[in-house]
Image (tube, rainbow, N blue to C red):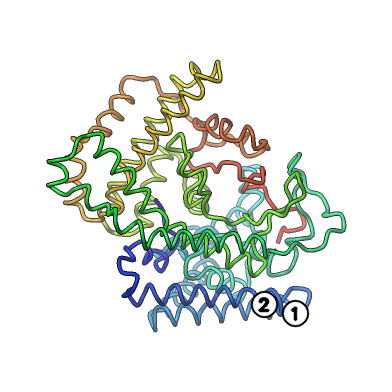
Amino acid sequence: MATTSTTGSTLLQPLSNAVQLPIDQVNFVVCQLFALLAAVWFRTYLHSSKTSSFIRHVVATLLGLYLALFCFGWYALHFLVQSGISYCIMIIIGVETMHNPMMIITQKITSLAYEIHDGMFRKDEELTPSQRDLAVRRMPSLLEYFSYTCNFMGILAGPLCSYKDYITFIEGRSYHVTQSAENGKEELPCGRAEPLPNMAVTQKLLVCGLSLFFHLTVSNMLPVEYNIDEHFQATTSWPARVLYLYVSLLAARPKYYFAWTLADAINNAAGFGFRGYDKNGEACWDLISNLRIQQIEMSTSFKMFLDNWNIQTALWLKRVCYERATLSPTIQTFILSAIWHGVYPGYYLTFLTGVLMTLAARAMRSNFRHYFIKSPQLKLLYDIVTWMVTQVAVSYTVVPFVLLSIKPSFTFYSSWYYCLHIIGILVLLLLPVEKTQRGKTTHENVQLSRSKKSDETENSLGQNSFSITNNVCNQNQELASRHSSLKQ
């Protein structure tokens, strides 16, 4: 269960009292609302058709640093120092050994480092299609670098975006060439007026409002900590305990939905996030969206849940670790995700358990799924059973992520007799496991219709643990809104 920023993670702590919110959480929400208004002003008065890229870079950077200063005080200078040092390292050593501890800043710096490395230090034939598409062919200027890492739209809660997509937005080129939803090929927008994000922003703000309301009302009545309450464990039946585990973790998710959807709406309000048009000619504003709530709640596999939860972080892990790892890429990727989150033991327990759950789910699917797709009735039964198992497995896995400390985490797992850990280990020992093909990109190039999306997403389970499922506009996240003229 990944998060995208230190500030965003403050929302991960319970907003337990709607009247007396912690000051850091109040500051975060106030700053994000200010950023939303600033984004509307930025798109209206500093549109790329009205001013230069230089001005847009300067304003985006200064507003971002101001928000960081307001939220964090003088500690915000750490953003500037870290970004400056990292920029110098990229110039001096050619971005060979980039790593930084901060969350969203770390994502941007490491992503850009690898993109520059791919574009300037590797041959095209050595790159995967996605690496070739994102490769940066020239060193960014200092202003471009600070604008990308510290802009007001994403400095507090992200989401992560590629450097090329950001520069394309700043220079006003994101509407010039779009991708056809029918064949995935680039084509001119045929004289269409520049799409407005108003409807997308309104819908996302509505989701934010509902998520916040749910969190402030329902979530506090279903604390995850109650799963380790001694009286609860002693007096409650197993079916009731399983149900409460699922419901309590379901109630814990709206705070993530609020933070990530608000961040997405801010970027859209500034005009960033347009990905093209769907087959019905509707504008899609999900280029940097971080989650798909319906797919999360209806996930029928562990991988499907991961693919739709914190999407940009999953893509980052895929690009900087999974595709580049030479040994046990799934394990290395989960460990990197744990390290990126911080030092709490609960993070490591969650992600190490996640490795086991992912590998076991992959083995189960490859060995049994083909028996259940021969008829619609069997397929429906399979989907229902796998949905139930997935939701329980995800909830079981992420309890330490919420509890954070090692003692309560082991208290929970021991109260469940480590049952899912044992089942996962037995599955891996008893069932043949097919090796995944890390470089395979067929699923990235196939455009799926909405009616087949869920089934096809399941079919991709045996491929990349961190590949992203096709989005609601039936276009792939990796191939969107980029074209040959973007090469730096």
Badge 1 marks a residue whose secondary structure is: loop
**Image coordinates for residue 12, horizontal then vertical, percent:** 36, 61
Residue 164 visible (yes or no): no
For mark 1, what is the residue? 51
Mark 1–mark 2 CB contact (< 8 Å): yes
Q: Amino acid at mark 2?
A: Arg
Above-or-below relation of 97 to 185: below
Is 144 placed left or right of 29 in the picture? right
Question: Which disc is residue 56 wearing?
Answer: 2
User: Crowding near pointer 2: few (<14 within 10 Å), some, many (20+)?
Assistant: some
Is 341 placed left or right of 482 in the picture? left
Question: What's the distance in space between the residues labelled 1 and 2, CA to CA?
Answer: 7 Å
Residue located 29% across and 53% down the image: 222
Dot 1 or dot 2: first in sequence order is 1
Above-or-below relation of 149 to 422: below
**Image coordinates for residue 151, horizontal then vertical, percent:** 56, 73
Residue located 35% across and 56% down the image: 218
**Image coordinates for residue 421, horizontal then vertical, percent:** 26, 34
